[in-house]
Image (cartoon, helix red, strand yellow):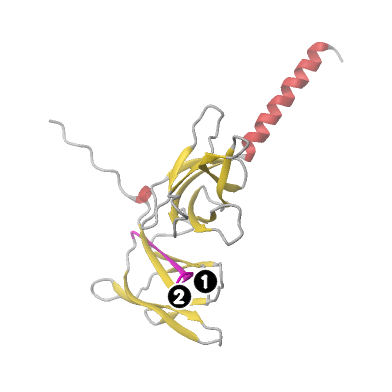
Amino acid sequence: MNPPLRLLLAVASLCLTAVSADAQTRKVQFRTLCLEHVGEMTEVALPAAKVDDAPVAVALYTASISPVIEGVFATNDAVFIGKALGPDGKPVPVATGPLAKSNRQLFLFLPAKAGSKIPYEVKAYDDDTDSFKLGTIRAINLAPTQVRFIVAGSTSPPIPPLKHAIFPQSAKKDDYNMYPAKVEFLSGDGKWFNAYSASWKASDERREIVITMVDEKFKQPAVKTFSDIPPWTEAPPAPAPRQ
């Protein structure tokens, strides 16, 4: 093989490798929600996308959903690292989980199961307003049993353990746009029991995230609710008037 042809093939091979690597990466705009901090780890980091870049700090919010962060992922898994390096001097993964499909995602951080080598498990959900529309409810069931919702007297299909469902807010509401909501858990003897009752406010401008689980400390059903107005749906602030 003559030298010019060999050089041309080598360059073509490098270009194909670069294209293949770029094709495998995914750019995702994501937000985080952490159910419970593990120890004092209230922040993790996304590995740098390029050699000369710094890791991207990711705060773990527990009372509300975090602001939007843009990240580049090398595979179809979300992998986050901690501040400390391993014995080999390399970053140590502290949270992992498979990515969802959308370019907008919500990452739910959970304490990893006993025996896990990493502190957190990550569950990803499509967060775009086509997959999760305004005026709807996302129910995430982390309990080891089925749950169901009774919204303004209408009962939802049961949601299996570790599954989630999206359904509309109630069309039946009072003069204040309020409607009653209950959450029932399925007991070991096959009977449904009420674990949560409240009045929810209907709105076409926001979404509701409801997480059902069993509190590990008290071994009791728990329901956590988060109202969500996606920041990208809000109108930008009006420009300040000129002086």
Which amino acid, by three-letter code, is at mark 1?
Answer: Ala
Q: From the viewer's perspective, is 202 left or right of 98?
A: left
Residue 133 coordinates in the image, percent (x, y): 43, 60
Disc on res. 126 = none
Q: From the viewer's perspective, is 220 left or right of 170?
A: right
25 vs 118: above or below: above
- Of all residues, the one furthest to the top in this rendering is 3
Residue 125 coordinates in the image, percent (x, y): 51, 57
Observer-nearest of 186 and 68: 186
Residue at horizontal 52 percent and vertical 71 percent from the top: 143
Label 1 CA crowd tier, 10 Å (few <14, some 14–19, many 20+):
many
Q: Secondary structure at mark 2?
A: strand
Q: Is residue 207 magenta?
A: yes
For the residues labelled 2 and 1, the Cα–Cα distance comes to: 8 Å
Viewport quadrant of the C terminus:
top left
- Of all residues, the one furthest to the front in this rendering is 87
- Of all residues, the one furthest to the right in this rendering is 1
Residue 160 coordinates in the image, percent (x, y): 56, 73
The residue identified by callout 2 is: 221
Q: From the viewer's perspective, is 62 left or right of 49?
A: left
Observer-nearest of 210 and 110: 110
Disc on res. 143 = 1
Kindly report the secondary structure that dominates the magenta region of the rendered protein: strand
Q: Which residues are magenta?
A: 205-221
